[in-house]
Image (cartoon, rainbow, N blue to C red):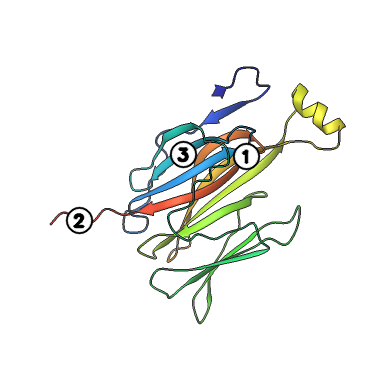
Amino acid sequence: MVCAMGATTCTSEAPQYQAKVDSRIAPGTVLVEVFVSRNGGDAFWQYRSTPSIGEVRVVRSGRHQRNVWTVPRFSTGDVRTERAEARSPNGRLVATCEYPGYGEQTKVEIQSEVRSMFHWQPKGWRGVDGFAWAPTSTSLALLNHSVESGYGPFDLLWSYAGHPPSHRTFYLTIIDVNSQQTTDYFLRGNVVAGEGKILDWTVEEPAK
């Protein structure tokens, strides 16, 4: 658990080792960033997830320079619109994310040309921050969060003003395209007004 000086809430760190996913399904590593917009530069934590060994590790943290935005290295689903879509690298599948409206469950589906292959059904409400295909097209990474209300002095003050801050817990969900099995990786909890993005998914080339 990490607390900033003078803060009324503390964010919680991820366990370093969690569930494993077969490397044939989710090869390589996924780089994710959780951040909080602040004057003078966003506070951020970058996580490297390696599903094949179940590892979640913080690789960078701090504050970005003011007005500097870290651009993802490849195209991912932009869920800031009502509907986002991303085609798998092999061109055979399409992942779509649709946000019906405030308080409603975000819809995530994977479809082939002939049928629907996956429909996301998380336990409890989850918001989606972004999604990206594995380079092998065998799985989809879904960055998402749950929301809870806070009860500290800061939270009560803003609640009385009509703007209660959201405390978000971030997860990286790996979706096996063939089996439809999902694996959640806890990233960070109790992030007030936090946001997230998937920066990269890399697979090392085999040694020659």
* Disc 2 from disc 1: Cα separation: 37 Å
* Disc 3 from disc 1: Cα separation: 13 Å
Residue occupying image coordinates x 62% and y 39%: 194
Q: Which residue is mark 1?
A: 194
Q: Quadrant of the N terminus?
A: top right
Q: Which residue is mark 2?
A: 206
Near mark 3 (Cα within 10 A), the count class, few <14, some 14-19 or many ≥20, is many
SS under mark 1 = loop
Please count the marks in the image.
3
Would you identify the image quadrant in which residue 54 lies? Answer: top left
Residue 125, position in %: x, y?
67, 50
Q: Amino acid at mark 3?
A: Gln
Q: Amino acid at mark 2?
A: Pro
Residue occupying image coordinates x 66% and y 58%: 106
Give above or below for 24 relative to 166. below
Q: Which is more toward the observer, 161 or 15?
A: 161
Residue 46, which numbered label? Answer: 3
SS under mark 3 = strand
Q: Amino acid at mark 1?
A: Gly
Which badge, 3 or 2, is on the more N-terminal residue?
3
Would you identify the image quadrant in which residue 84 lies? Answer: bottom right
